[in-house]
Image (cartoon, helix red, strand yellow):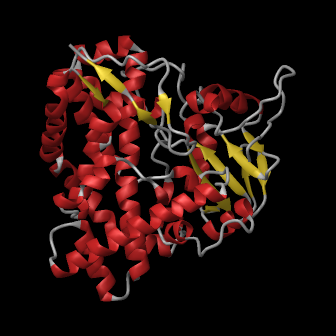
Amino acid sequence: MNDMTPPALDGAPLEFNPLDPAFIADPYPFYRRLRETAPVFKTPQGLWLVTRYDDVTFALRDKRFGKDFVGNLERRYGNLARMDEPAIASLARTMLVLDPPDHTRLRALVTKAFTARRVADMRPRIKALVDAQLDRVIDKGEMDVMRDLAHRLPVIVICDMLGIPEEHRAPFLAGSNVNGRILEPVPMSREELDQANRNSLMAGAYFDQLCELRRREPKDDLTTELVRAEEAGDKLTAEELQANIGLLFGAGHETTTNLIGNGLLALHRHPDQWERLKADPSLIPNAVEELLRYDSSVQITGRVTNAQVEIGGVTVGADENVIALLGAANHDPAQYRDPDRLDVGRANVRPLSFGGGIHYCLGAQLARLEAELVFTALVERLPTIELPEKDTPAWRRSFTLRGLSKLPAVWH
């Protein structure tokens, strides 16, 4: 699916290469034209793209849309990808791509770690961590927001939750190995798959060590809870244990990292909105919702129909791949007036950035809290912060996970 061409608009076909740098820099004009001309569109490669808010919401919540990870993979990759590929085999054991009852069983094991009360109790610790990251750079007058703040903060938070010892954290803090390409409708090349396999094997080896450590030295952390479930023998296999700890680590920081980076970039591309937050920091929790809507960290999520279903007036057969374009739905003018305008005071913002239905992001409230505390600290401690490269930002080569590879900042 390197080229998908929806119907022509005013005689000009819409050519879509989701890994094209121009598309990655700004996918929203394409989404708009797709919503207007073919809101439920089947690509030449057999993928259904869904772009309207109500239709995406329906696909995320209706039981006729499942995951069918193995079948989905075979349709996308053919013989290139097999279940003995380490990266694919590991992902296939995670709650992210499973249907009930396996999804229900695995999610139940970790839900209590992300309850509203548990997350609220983390506020003092997260606030102290935000201040600590700023303390490291504030006297320098500059930082790379992605490396020095947006990545470090959520990595430390998820390391705390998983019980990863501080002396083990340096490789995780150095940079991200999270690769959203494996989730994308564009198949990975053999080289990309080989790299994903290497990353998966390295991560798996570490998380196996972490589980062994927590068997010997149990603590009040999520890994210890999961190890106990695995040892009980009826809730979790050893392979599922490793895979889902890896998932929690990756998902636990990647989307928050990109929320902070994308959000700060959006605010500085709309300086009037940054000034509003400085004048009235009480707007920040609502601003986080608007930033989630405006430039979502997660742009798409996939489903597979398990029965014939009508969506947006179009009949889709069983066993069809459906791509819910969350970023497009968040800019639907039927849901949000003037959707391409950033408005930190916008009322009734309900972005689909965390998905919906049974796969709604477990860490949504945690991500919101981390972003709220980051933007509050920036407004209070670095009110003069500027982004010299805000007009030419360095976007990562990813369609599913939208984020920046770097974001230089200066202040005086």
How far across and down, in percent of the image, does residue 388 sit? 38, 16
Location of residue 250 by image quarter:
bottom left
Q: Is residue 62 visible?
A: no
On-image quarter of the C terminus: top left
Q: Is residue 263 left or right of residue 173?
A: right
Pick the residue in front: 147 or 283. 147
Whether residue 79 is situated above or below residue 212 in the rendered picture? above
> At x 36% / y 43%, what residue is drawn?
256
Q: Quadrant of residue 17?
A: top right
- The residue at the far right in this view is 11
Q: Residue at x 28, y 24 (%)?
A: 283
Report x, y in % for residue 343.
42, 20
- Looking at the image, is 320 positioned above or below residue 332? below
Query: Between 46 and 349, which is closer to the camera in this rendering?
Result: 46
Residue 321 pos. (x, y %): 70, 57
Which one is nearer the viewer's eye here, 79 or 359? 79
Tell me the quarter of the picture where residue 205 sits: bottom left
Residue 335 located left or right of residue 111: right
Q: Residue at x 48, y 37 (%)?
A: 296
Question: Residue drawn 58% across and 27% down?
Answer: 26
What is the count of numbered marks?
A: 0
Answer yes or no: is residue 404 visible: yes
Tell me where residue 315 appears, x and y as whole percent: 79, 52
Residue that protrudes farthest toward the bottom in the picture: 233
